[in-house]
């Protein structure tokens, strides 16, 4: 809770607009009134709020009137009841996190191909990540390299570009879609130069699923795990060493299949969401796992890590936060079409609300 208060205070410094309006009587503007209410509901004392408003030039009498109005408002009282319910939920999640941390390994376990029923019991239904070997050994695509794509070099592929100049490149992925000849992309990948500026990701799936369809026959099945009728609905990934997918969570369970190169994945359990600075939709303000190092134990998210190599399939449970770094030039696929219930997005209600 204390961390969230600091987060709200930092964002307030960037709020635009005139702080105090003059008509018909002096008052704090709507944006700052919201900031006052947000901080009060997050448990902040009145004094630091008043100090911040005074630093920004609000008169003392206006500050006193606004804080009195906010704290006595029936809307605030109702909001305080909701905040108390959320605090109770955070307590439940924190208790689960403390208990789970007693037995949670710091590295994702690696297993050989399990029986589907065992995977369902031990990982899918239990919300436990795992790296599985042997699931794609029979795929012709298992041998994909950049050379395999030379036969398609004249097609126009969609790529995420211009990422390094935008700290919110993942959130604003629609603004970074660019189409280029596949030949140009292959030439750049062959240079071996590390970069996070360009990357073919799942966000390019709509266009690339169609233009790469000649390769889809080389993607095999996963009997008992994925629905064979929708295996072509997978997402294609390809990028250079140095690509970063920042911390986020998905609204589905996922299989992340590594075909070429190696990726390092850092995961944070779904029950640690209150520590992940979740400021917007499914995204975190944490820049990466290194940022956790200096946090006090009570505020530090629990992490588990793994390196996924060619032939590996990483199961990422729904809601688990993950940060992915390309350690080499990489090619991969991801899938959500499991044979078990995977519809968690329908009940997701906070999109657009935070």
Image (cartoon, grey):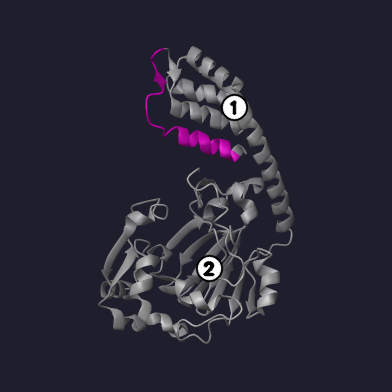
Residue 217 visible somewhere in the drawing: yes
Q: Which residues are magenta?
A: 3-24
List x then y, in percent, for residue 116.
65, 77
Residue 200 visible somewhere in the drawing: no
Element assignment for label 2: loop
List x then y, in percent, for residue 228.
53, 78
Give above or below for 259 relative to 265.
Answer: below
List x then y, in percent, for residue 25.
42, 12
Drawn side of residue 262 relative to residue 146, left or right: right
The image shows a total of numbered marks equal to: 2
Per the model, the C-alpha gap separating discs 1 and 2 is: 41 Å
Give above or below for 261 relative to 25.
Answer: below
Element assignment for label 1: helix
Foreground residue, 226 or 191? 226
The quarter holding residue 132 reads: bottom right
Label 1–label 2 contact, CB within 8 A: no
Q: Which residue is under mark 2?
A: 336
Residue at 33 percent of width and 54 percent of height: 175
Magenta-drawn stretch contains 212: no
Mark 1 and mark 2 lie on one chain; the one further toward the N terminus is 1
Label 1 packing within 10 angstroms: few (<14), some (14-19), many (20+)? some
Foreground residue, 62 or 212? 212
Q: Which mark is residue 76?
A: 1
Drawn side of residue 208 relative to residue 124, left or right: left
Give above or below for 127 relative to 40.
Answer: below
Foreground residue, 154 or 285? 154
Residue at 44 percent of width and 32 percent of height: 13
Magenta-drawn stretch contains 15: yes
Q: Which mark is residue 215?
A: none
List x then y, in percent, for residue 65.
53, 15
Label 2 packing within 10 angstroms: few (<14), some (14-19), many (20+)? many
Residue at 52 percent of width and 27 percent of height: 36
């Amino acid at each position: 809770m204390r961390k969230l208060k600091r987060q709200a205070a930092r964002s307030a410094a960037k709020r635009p607009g005139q702080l105090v309006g003059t008509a018909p009587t002096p008052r704090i503007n709507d944006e700052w009134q919201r900031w006052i209410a947000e901080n009060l509901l997050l448990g902040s004392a009145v004094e630091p709020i008043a100090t911040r408003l005074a630093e920004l030039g609000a008169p003392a009498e206006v500050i006193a009137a606004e804080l009195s109005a906010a704290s006595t408002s029936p809307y605030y009282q109702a909001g305080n009841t909701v905040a108390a319910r959320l605090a109770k939920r955070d307590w439940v999640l924190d208790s689960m996190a403390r208990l789970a941390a007693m037995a949670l390994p710091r590295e994702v376990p690696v297993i050989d191909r399990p029986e589907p029923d065992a995977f369902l019991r031990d990982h899918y239904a239990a919300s436990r990540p795992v790296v599985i070997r042997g699931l794609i050994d029979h795929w012709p695509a298992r041998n994909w390299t950049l050379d395999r794509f030379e036969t398609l070099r004249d097609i126009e592929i969609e790529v995420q570009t211009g990422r390094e100049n935008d700290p919110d490149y993942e959130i604003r992925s629609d603004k970074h879609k660019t189409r280029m000849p596949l030949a140009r992309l292959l030439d750049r990948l062959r240079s071996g130069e590390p970069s996070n500026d360009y990357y073919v990701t799942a966000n390019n799936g709509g266009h690339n699923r169609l233009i790469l369809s000649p390769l889809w026959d080389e993607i095999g099945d996963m009997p008992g795990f994925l629905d064979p009728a929708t295996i072509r609905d997978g997402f294609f990934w390809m990028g250079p060493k140095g690509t970063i997918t920042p911390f986020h969570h998905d609204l589905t369970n996922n299989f992340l299949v590594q075909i070429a190169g190696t990726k390092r994945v850092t995961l944070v359990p779904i029950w640690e969401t209150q520590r992940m600075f979740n400021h917007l939709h499914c995204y975190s303000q944490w820049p990466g796992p290194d940022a956790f190092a200096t946090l006090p134990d009570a505020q530090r998210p629990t992490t588990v890590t793994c390196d996924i190599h060619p032939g590996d399939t990483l199961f990422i449970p729904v809601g688990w936060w993950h940060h992915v770094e390309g350690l080499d030039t990489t090619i991969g696929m991801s899938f959500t079409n499991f044979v078990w219930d995977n519809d968690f997005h329908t009940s997701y209600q906070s999109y657009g609300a935070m």
